[in-house]
Image: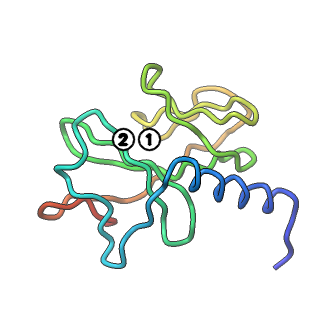
Amino acid sequence: MKLTRRSALRMALIGASTTLFGSRAVAANNQIIKLSKIKVGATYSFQLSNGAPALLFRTKTGVFAYQTICTHQGGLTQYFPTRKLLVCPVHNASFNPFKAGAVVSGPATNPLPSVKVAIKGDWVILA
């Protein structure tokens, strides 16, 4: 595999975000977090088995999640709850997590990839 500048930057951003934000890896049994540990309206950062960072949202009606790597050039998006947007600091692309990760503005043209999650018993799991 050839390591490009973009790939190196993406991996550095993922590593830095894990260190700074304490992203937790999904357990071997696909458990992400106990449902009781995340309040309605809250988010929870975690890491997929491939190393990609992801963000879980809990609403009154359930849970959903997205990978948080920008679809434009691989920057790491951050969630701004007051604006209800995920925003990439690299080129200011923004995404609406409440509308299937749709692009709101910026150079990105593709929505954020969704992560299939479900509630099973007391846990939020990868589905």
Residue 35 place in picture, x, y as percent = 20, 52
Q: Residues within 10 Å of mark 1 (few under 14, many from 20)?
A: some
* Disc 1 element: loop
Image depth: mark 2 or mark 1 in front: 2
The residue depicted at 31 percent of the width and 37 percent of the height is 42
- Left or right: 126 with respect to 83? left
Name the quarter where the N terminus is drawn.
bottom right
Q: Give the image quarter of residue 11.
A: bottom right
Q: How far is disc 2 from disc 1 in space, using C-alphas?
A: 16 Å
The image shows residue 106 at horizontal and vertical percentages of 70, 29
Q: Residue 9 carries which label?
A: none
Residue located at (22% from left, 39% from top): 39
Where residue 12 sits: x, y (%)? 73, 57
Q: Is 94 rendered above or below residue 21?
A: above
Mark 2 residue type: Thr
At label 2, counting other C-alpha atoms closer than 10 Å, the crowd grade (few under 14, some 14-19, many 20 or more) is some
Query: In the drawing, does residue 1 fall left or right of residue 21?
Result: right
Q: Is residue 100 above or below residue 83?
A: below
Amino acid at circle 1: Ala
Residue that mark 2 sits on: 43
Q: Residue 100 carries which label?
A: 1
Earlier along the polypeptide chain: callout 2 or callout 1?
2
- The image shows residue 71 at horizontal and vertical percentages of 66, 47
Instruction: Tell me the quarter of the image containing the C terminus.
Output: bottom left
